[in-house]
Image (spheres, rainbow, N blue to C red):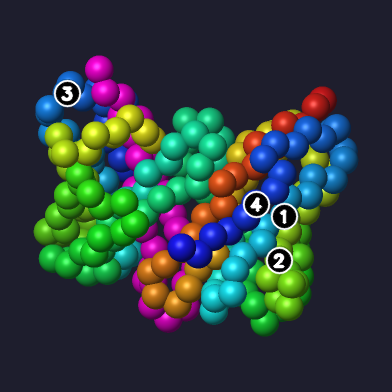
Amino acid sequence: QQQVKQSPQSLIVQKGGISIINCAYENTAFDYFPWYQQFPGKGPALLIAIRPDVSEKKEGRFTISFNKSAKQFSLHIMDSQPGDSATYFCAVHTGGFKTIFGAGTRLFVKA
Amino acid sequence: DGGITQSPKYLFRKEGQNVTLSCEQNLNHDAMYWYRQDPGQGLRLIYYSQIVNDFQKGDIAEGYSVSREKKESFPLTVTSAQKNPTAFYLCASSIGGRGTFYGYTFGSGTRLTVV
């Protein structure tokens, strides 16, 4: 079974700091690498995504860094805010209908 | 506003009972999905449907059934054969899985508890 390994499981960051969450995937032809944000009791929401033809994508305070050769990608949250406290999931998607999710990272931003 | 509506938000099931979770979307998306979320685990795919009157098993389909009679609707039935149904169930949709994929839109979920 293909897996996506996400780390850390939990993360505490001071307000204004940088939050970094990492994901590593196994050797398969994935073509879409999203990050989802989930608040308690809610469904996940697509936060930012990248395709394998670029190494970095930035949207506001959120950046994805993608290392195709290492089969790793990461989410960076700059100037972290208490409102960013949530669970974050990475995922990898193949052509077709297959998406594999990481186990999630619980982020807490201290005010 | 376009989106996915799941109901009910909370559901309690007695032993041996079948229950049905509702999922409706007004995004005009072709593909719809059901995921199960357990604490500390990623989302696991139960069933998905690419078009009306067609659906495929996901990784954990045993004890579940679905139908897709309308493009907008994709209900999930949790049968008595599902021995550990307590979980958070998420319905999702996408423009299409094949070709260019743009990620999922998720509903707000249904929390199912066995009593």
Left or right of B105 in this view: A88: right
Q: Are marks 3 and 4 on the same chain?
A: no
Q: Which residue is mark 4?
A: A6
Have a look at marks 2 and 4 and say if they share a chain: yes
Say what secondary structure mark 3 lies in: loop
Q: Residue B112 occupies which quadrant of the picture?
A: top left
Marks 2,1: beta carbons within 8 A: yes
Say whether residue B63 is left or right of residue A68. left
Q: Which residue is mark 2?
A: A72
Q: Are labels 2 and 3 on one chain?
A: no
Alpha-carbon span between mark 2 and mark 3: 43 Å
Compute the Cα span from label 3 to label 4: 35 Å
Q: Residue at x 70, y 36 (%)?
A: A10
- Disc marking residue A75: none
Span shown in magenta: B89-115
Chain letter for mark 4 = A
User: Which x, y percent locates residue B13?
Assistant: 21, 24
| Distance from the alpha carbon under mark 2 to that under mark 1 | 7 Å
The residue where tag 1 is placed is A22
Tell me the residue at 15%/55% (across/down).
Answer: B67
The residues bearing labels 1 and 4 have C-alpha atoms spaced at a distance of: 6 Å
Q: Is residue B27 above or below residue A29?
A: above
Which is nearer the N-term, disc 1 or disc 4?
A: 4
Marks 2 and 1 on same chain: yes
User: Residues at badges 2 and 4 in contact (C-beta under 8 Å)?
Assistant: no
